[in-house]
Amino acid sequence: VNGGLLRKALRVATVNQKAVPILFGASLRNLGVQPLLDAIVDFLPSPLDRPPVTARTGDGVEKLIKPELGSASDPLPACALAFKVTHDHHRGLIVYLRVYRGTFRPGEVLINSSRSSATTTEAIKERPLRFFQLHAEDLIDISEAGPGAIVAAIGLKNTSTGDTLVHFHRSAQPPKQADRKALATIRMPGIETPPAVFFCTVEAESAKKQTDLDQALALLFKE
């Protein structure tokens, strides 16, 4: 069987969840690493192979999240999902984002729609200071992040794992003020946290350590 035809058939079966390719190797000895990377490209679905993500506004209206911006019939804002939050001793909070729609740039005002409500007048706003491209343990400065990008952001103070960030681009078709307020509450499918199976009590060893404990627990809660 021709190799190209076989790879194409495996990709179709994998994308349709009819088959799961299995590869063998040992990364410690650098065995099978390159075939694994090739298999990710050859077999796993790209965003173009999947249907648009369905999000919901604060009042429960479903919206399809498409990568493009600017259509008069599709005034949705740029959207990104915070799928992981960690704390770095030097950089502070690092929020890992997956951009689903539009373009995000450092310094722009973002709205945390997961913590905003259509019934309140004040939206929860964020302003990322820098965006980084992930390369193993290295963080490389980038000037913008487009659809499909996975980036690390610093400067976000009120964003937790599973939150949605939105941004209305000036170049896009501006929605009406009432629609804008509703669209600012749009939320991507979040990350479900499984029920706790272990419970314990944590106490500071002294009154002086109570503030440090409170800060550590607050950071842990964000993650």
Image: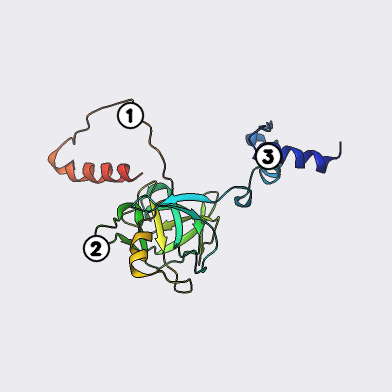
**Disc 1 secondary structure class:** loop
Whole-percent x, y for residue 183 in the image: 38, 60
Residue at the spot 22% in from the left edge and 32% down from the top edge: 202
Task: Say which of 4 and 138 sits in front.
Answer: 4
Snapshot quadrant of residue 21: top right
Amino acid type at circle 3 is Leu
Residue 36 numbered tag: 3
Instruction: Assign the N terminus to one quadrant of the image.
Output: top right
- The answer to whether residue 155 of the structure is visible from this angle is no
**134 displayed left or right of 175:** right
Q: Earlier in the sequence, mark 3 or mark 2?
A: 3
Q: Picture quarter containing residue 212?
A: top left
- Pick out the residue farthest to the right: 1
Task: Tell me the SS state at disc 3.
Answer: helix
Per the model, the C-alpha gap separating discs 3 and 2 is: 50 Å
Q: Residue 14: give its label.
A: none
Q: How many numbered marks, from 0 up?
A: 3
Where residue 16 sits in the image (x, y, percent)?
A: 65, 38
The numbered dot on residue 196 is 1
Residue 106 in the image: state x and y as whole percent.
43, 66
Q: Between 76 and 29, which is closer to the camera in this rendering?
A: 76
- Three-letter amino acid code at the position of disc 2: Thr
On the rendered structure, is 182 left or right of 208? right
For label 2, the SS is loop
Q: Give the foreground label among 3 and 1.
A: 1
> How far apart, in angstroms, are the residues tagged by discs 3 and 1?
35 Å
Q: Earlier in the sequence, mark 2 or mark 1?
A: 2
Marks 2/1: CA distance?
35 Å
**Closer to viewer: mark 3 or mark 2:** 2
Q: Which residue is mark 2?
A: 121
